[in-house]
Amino acid sequence: MRKLLLVIILFSFQQLFGQLKPADSIRLENLMKQMTLEEKIGQMNMYTGNIFGDDPVFTADFKYEDLKNGRVGAVLNVNGIKNTKYLQELALQSRLKIPLLFGNDVLHGLHLLFPIPLAEAASWDIGLMEKTARIAAIESSARGNNWFFQPMVDITHDPRWGRVMEGAGEDPYLGSLIAAARVRGYQGNGIGDTTSVMATAKHFAAYGAAIGGRDYNTVDMSNQELWNVYLPPFKAAAEAGASSFMNSFNTLNGVPTTASSYLQRDILKGEWGFRGFVVSDWGSVGDMIAHGYVKDAEGAALAAVTAGCDMDMEDQIYKKYLPKLVAEGKVSMDIIDDAVRRILTKKFELGLFDDPFKFISQERWEKAINNPGHIETARQMGRESIVLLKNEIPEGKTQPVLPLSKNIKTIALIGPHIMSVRENLGFWSPWWPDDSTRIITQYQGIKSKVSANTRLLYAKGCEVSDTSTAGFAEAVRIAKQADVVIMSMGEQFDMSGESRSRSDITFPGVQEALIKAIYATGTPIVMLVNAGRPLVFNWAADHVPAILYTWWLGTTAGGAIADVLFGDYNPSGKLPITFPRSVGQVPIFYNHLSTGKPPKNDSIAYYRTGYIDLMQNPKFAFGHGLSYTTFEYGDFRMSDSTMKTDGSIRVSLSVTNTGKVAGEETVQLYLRDKVGSIARPVKELKDFKKVILKPGEKKRVEFVITPDKLTFYNEQGKQVLEPGEFDVMIGSASDDIRLKGSFLLNDEL
Ligand code: GLC
C-alpha cells in the first residue's frame, strides 16, 4: 500500500512540474521561495554576447553587473569553452547561484556545416535529418551551448523571403515530420544528457507568410489557413517535446505574435499543453512600439508577459519595467512565477543545478569535431539533398549528359562558384573559420573524382553579381576545348537568410549571359545552381541539358556534388518547395484550392486562373526530382472503396526500376477531399515512402490511409473529419501522378 501511495505522489509531482524528478521539483519550489522579485525577473532576461567576435564576451559593462547580481537567466552568441565557462562562473557569484542557459543559432551545424535546412528537406530523409541534428547537438553541447534556437519550422509559399532557406519548404505534412525529427535529434535521449541541447520551435507563428516575402512584414490570414498550413509543424515540434518556442517579428492579423495570447496561451500552453517556455525573438518585445501596438516600453512589457512570452531577448524591457508593473498590480505574481517556473524547470531538467559546467568539455569537443562518421554523414546528407531537375540527351549525342565519365578527356569548369569556399556554407554559418580547412570546394570535389588523364580547365567567367563580362572570352575559349562544361552558378551565400528578401529571384549579375555564351559554343553543359531559395532561370532551364540544384551543401559540398556528377551517387532529391516561372507567379504552391474555374489549359480565356503572358503551372513542381534511372509504377490496389471514420484503407502499388543503375525513388501519396465545409486543396501530401531498387528490381509499396490523414481544421481551429469522397493520387512528384483511385468515407455503409 505504502508503495502505491508513493507512486501516486510521485506521479502527481511529475504532472505538476512536467518532466522533473520529485527531488528537483522540491528544490525548484524551495528556490522560488527564496527568490526576490528582481531575481525572478532576472531569469526572464536574456542578453547577447559579442556577436562580432569573442573578446570582450559582452560589449557592455552593465551586462557583467547584471550577471553577477542574478539579473540574467540566459545568454546567446557566446562561443567557445573559455567564454562559456567565464560567464557561468560570473552567474554563480550571484546570491542564489542560478546557472545560465547558453543559446545559439546552430541552424545546420556548428563546426561541421551540413546542407542548409531547405536543402536537407529536399532529401525527404527524415532519419538522416534527425542524425545531422544529433551531430550538431553533440558538437555544440561540448562547447557549452545547451539551447538551440532551432528548428525553424516556418512554412512559406514565397521564395522572395530570404528565410525560406532556414525551413522545410511549403508543405505542412513534410514540414511536420522534419520539425519533429530535428527536435528529436537536438534533444536526443532527453535534455539531461550531456550531448543533448534544448530545441526551440520558431518563429511562432506564420512568419513565412509575410506580405510580399518582405522579411519582418505583416501577416494576415484566416484561422483555417493558420491551422491547416502554418501551425502543423509547430504542433509536431511541441508533441516531439521541444523545450522552448520562439515567437516572431510579425503581426498576425494585427497583433504582434509576441503579444498574442491566442497563440502563446490559448493554443500553445493551453490546447497543446506545452510546458516549456517561450522566448521573444531579438528585441521583438520592444518592436511592438514600432508596430504601433503599444505606446511605450512599459506597455510592451505588459502586453508581452501577459500574453505568455516568458523571456525577453536582449532589449532589457522586462528587467526595466516588470518590477513597476508588478508593484502597481498590473502584472500578477502568478504570471511571473509561471514564467520563472517554466525556465527553471528546464535548467533543472538540463542538470545545470547539479553541474553548471556539465556541457563544457574540451575532450568531448575534440572528439566530436574529429569524428569521421560525422563528416561522412554530412556528405551523405549533401548527396541526398541534391535535386536533379533535368538530364537530357544533347543534340547529336545518344546519352543524357549525366552521370559524367571519370575518364572524360577535358572538362571546362566555369562560373563564380567553382572555386568558392565560404559560399558553400550558406547563411547562419558564423563559425565557418573554425572549419574552413575542411571545406571541400566544388573544384576539389571534381578533381578528386576524375582520372589522371582528365584535363580540367577553369575560368570563372563572371562574378556572382557584378556586371562585367570581361571574363566571358576566356570562358568561351576553354569551353570550346572541352568535351563537357560544368557551370556553377547562383546566389552569394548571404543573398538568402535573415533580412535577405529579394524582389528579383533570377540569377544575379550577368550569369545568364555567360550561360548563353557558353551554350553557343555547342559544348554540352551541366549546370549546378547554388542558392538558399528557388531561383528563376527559365532560359537556362529550357536550354541547358542537365541541371542539378545544389543549394548550399556545407563543409563537404564539393565532395557530395562530385559524387552525384560522376554517378557515385544516383540523385534522389525531391523539391520541398515549388519553383515559379517568374516572381510574378508568387505565391504559387501545389496544395492550392481548385477555384471555381480550374484551368483547362493556358489559352482559353476565363479558364486560365493565371496570366495571359505566362503558363499556369510552375517551372518545377513540389516533389519534382529525377534520377539517373527510371521508375515504373503499376499494379495499384486498394483494400476497399469505402472507409469508416474509425477505419483505414490500405493502398499499394509496385515500383520497378526500369533503368540501368540502382536508384532511390520517393513515392508520394496525395489525397483530395472532394467536398468539404470549407473548400479543400486539389491535393495534399499525406505520406511518402523511399524505396531503393536495383536495375530491373520491383518492390511493393504500401500506404495505410487512416482518419488522421483526412482531417482538417475549420475556422474555429477545430480538427474535423467529414464524410465524403476522397481522391487518392500516387506520384513521383505533385505534377507527376502515376496512379489514381478514390474511396468514400462514410459510417453508414
Ligand atoms: C534573429 C532571428 C532568430 C534568431 C535570433 C537570435 O533575429 O530572427 O531566428 O534565433 O535573432 O539570433
Image (cartoon, rainbow, N blue to C red):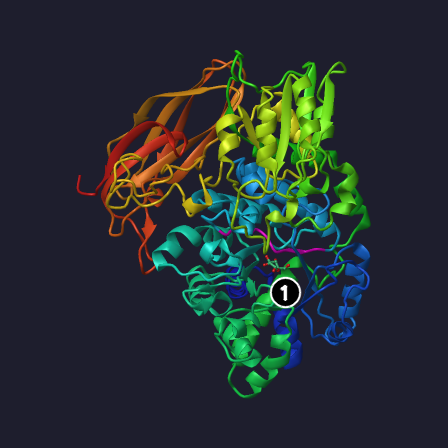
Q: Nearer the viewer, residue 564 or 729?
A: 564
Up-down relation of residue 487 to residue 75 (above or below): above
Magenta-drawn stretch, dominant element (helix, strand or loop): loop
**Quarter assignment of residue 590:** top left
Looking at numbered disc 1 in the image, what kind of residue is underneath it?
Ala
Q: Report the residue that reaches farthest toward the left.
A: 748
Q: Could you say whether the residue bearing mark 1 is in a helix, strand or loop? A: helix
Q: Report the residue that reaches farthest toward the bottom.
A: 328
Question: Is residue 199 toward the left or the right of residue 113 in the image?
Answer: left
Q: Looking at the picture, how far across and down is residue 82, in whole percent?
A: 82, 57
**Quarter assignment of residue 555:** top right
Residue that appears at 32% across and 44% down: 681
The verdict on residue 146 being magenta is: yes
The verdict on residue 95 being magenta is: no
Res 200 visible: yes
Up-down relation of residue 199 to residue 181 (above or below): below
Q: Looking at the picture, how far across and down is residue 119, in whole percent?
A: 57, 39
Q: Nearer the viewer, residue 304 or 488?
A: 488
Quadrant position of the C terminus in the picture: top left
Res 36 visible: no
Residue that appears at 35% across and 59% down: 222
How dense is the environment of label 1, judged by Cα within 10 Å: few (below 14), some, or many (20 and up)? few
Q: Nearer the viewer, residue 528 or 363?
A: 528
Q: Looking at the picture, how far across and down is residue 722, in whole percent?
A: 25, 48
State the extent of the magenta-drawn residues as a range.
145-154
Residue labelled with disc 1: 23
Q: Looking at the picture, how far across and down is residue 704, in whole percent?
A: 36, 34
Residue that appears at 39% across and 39% down: 686
Count of numbered badges drawn on the protein: 1
Find ligand 1 in the image and state its quadrant. Answer: bottom right
Q: Nearer the viewer, residue 512 or 489?
A: 512
